[in-house]
Image (cartoon, coloured by chain):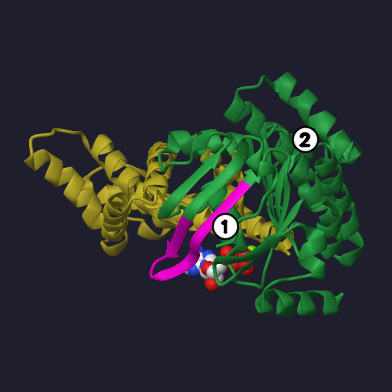
Chain colours: A yellow, B green
Amino acid sequence: MGREEFVFLLIGLKWTVALSIVAFVCGCVAGLVVALARTSGIAIVEGVTAFYIAIFQGTPLLMQLFVVYYGLALVGIRMDAWAAVSVGLTLHASAYLGEIWRGSIEAVPRGQTEAAKALALGYVSRMKDVVLPQAIRISLPATVGFLVQLIKGTSLASIVGFTELTRAGNIISNQIFQPITVFGIVGALYFIMCCPLTIWGAHLERRFAASAR
Amino acid sequence: MIQTATKADTTEPMITMSDVGKWYGAFQALHDVDITVAKGERIVLCGPSGSGKSTLIRCINHLEAYQKGEIHVGGILLGHSSKTIDAVRREVGMVFQQFNLFPHLTVLQNCMLAPIRALGLSKAEAQERAKSLLERVKISEQAEKYPAQLSGGQQQRVAIARALCMRPKVMLFDEPTSALDPEMVKEVLDTMIALAEEGMTMICVTHEMGFARQVADRVIFMANGAIVEEAPPAEFFSNPQHERTRKFLGEILGRH
Ligand SMILES: Nc1ncnc2c1ncn2[C@@H]1O[C@H](COP(=O)(O)OP(=O)(O)O)[C@@H](O)[C@H]1O
Ligand SMILES: [Mg+2]
């Protein structure tokens, strides 16, 4: 495999990173909304968000990307592959992160919210100053774990024709007929991204377990 | 029904609960509760576990909603709109059995948060106020520490200071010494006694009968979600009117 092919893979890698970042950052913002809605105490809002989460947890990510990519085109919204997979992955991430954070919000002891209420703090301050800082700490290991899943999940974007790392590998492999070498390198690139995050997640988990004792 | 002649009859009442009923689903936790607390009055609320003491004081700052009757605090009718609830909560401080300090904030930050967010104080004002109140509960040297670094007694004194930073008109205590090791009970009671001596209106759920004798104007005894009897402490301890009260006092005083 030559230099040009390798550079082509690196460009694919760049898009994988970009896609992961966009989906994770937008997914965090939307996921926060989902988590707050899911714990709002308003029955209908909680019900609707529970359904939203169930849909994304109960169907394959690939199907979700298909629905966004082809479905939006059907209703007349034209998007290029990059925008479509970003939207699809963001929605996917919002549901998963929303559910992770719902659990963490509920894991913060009730007494915290009660003390905040007794101090006349309104909802925004109760969440922003009291509950979320503690919930985020609790959720950090699971959040990092999901980020790793998300990075690997971006490879499915290749199937709707977006040239990220996996599709770049596919293209090169078809050109030079060295699938083992090419996908070995592709795999190594994913590993380099994901493995440190996994180690960091495990580290956070240990630290959290230690401080909870 | 029991009516006692107290200071409440001569001055504007700080708290009135009239005919208050509270249900958890089908279970009635409070039955027709009538209490009037005068400004500056110190009430000790006691009764067996599950008798509704926590429920009663948690209705006063609407941590629990009540379904029947009326509660007035500092002249405000505690309705169910967030406006009146917040207005009442700004006047009422609460201290919990489990302290409930915010573990991710330092002692000083714990005390500064609500005055800034709920009263709109500037950071400097809130800090000055927090420092003076931490001084008052004799814990100012711990201001930069986190709650987990303090003993239980110290944490509870911080919790008292945190509530006082709102300059409340009323303080509610829900078994503030029950979670403490015995050697730390005194420091918290001393803080509460000092507060009582300064004229704070207080309702204390506690089984510390020594505290009741020393500072209470009235002791209220509850059982099964209703007020059974209320009297000044001397009378309450020496001449309880009801069998239920005598049994309770026998248990609680026999233990100590
Ligand atoms: N959130 C709740 N849901 C249902 N029942 C409750 C709840 N909180 C308290 N109770 C019930 O109400 C009664 C009074 O409780 P509580 O006020 O905590 O009593 P106390 O503080 O005197 O021990 C108890 O029987 C208790 O089981
Ligand atoms: Mg209780």
For disc 1, the chain is: B
Q: Is residue B118 left or right of residue A74?
A: right
Question: A138 above or below B145?
Answer: below
Residue A70 lies, in percent from the top left, at: 13, 45
Which residue, given by chain and number where applicable, does mark 1 sit on?
Answer: B56
- Cβ at disc 1 under 8 Å from ligand 1: yes
Magenta segment includes B25: yes
Q: Which residue is mark 2?
A: B108
Q: Which residues are magenta?
A: B20-36
Disc number placed over residue B205 in the picture, else none: none
The residue at the point 36 percent across, 56 percent down is A178
For mark 2, give the secondary structure.
helix
Residue B34 percent across, percent down from the top left: 54, 55
Same subunit, labels 1 and 2: the answer reads: yes
* Ligand 2 found in image quarter: bottom right
| Distance (Cα) linking label 1 and label 2 | 30 Å
Q: At which x and y percent is residue A34?
A: 37, 47
Quadrant for the C terminus of chain A in the image: bottom right
Task: Confirm or deny contact between disc 1 and disc 2 (CB under 8 A).
Answer: no
Q: Classify residue B11 as left or right of residue B1.
A: right
* Residue type for callout 2: Leu
User: Which numbered disc flags the more N-terminal residue, 1 or 2?
Assistant: 1
Kindly identify the residue that appears in the image at 46 percent across and 52 percent down. Answer: B65
In the rendered image, residue B214, in percent from the top left (x then y), is placed at 87, 54
Q: Is residue B250 magenta?
A: no
- Image-based side of B177 in relation to B241, left or right: right
Mark 2, other Cα within 10 Å: few <14 / some 14–19 / many ≥20? many
**Circle 1: element type:** helix
User: Which is more toward the observer, A93 or B217?
Assistant: B217
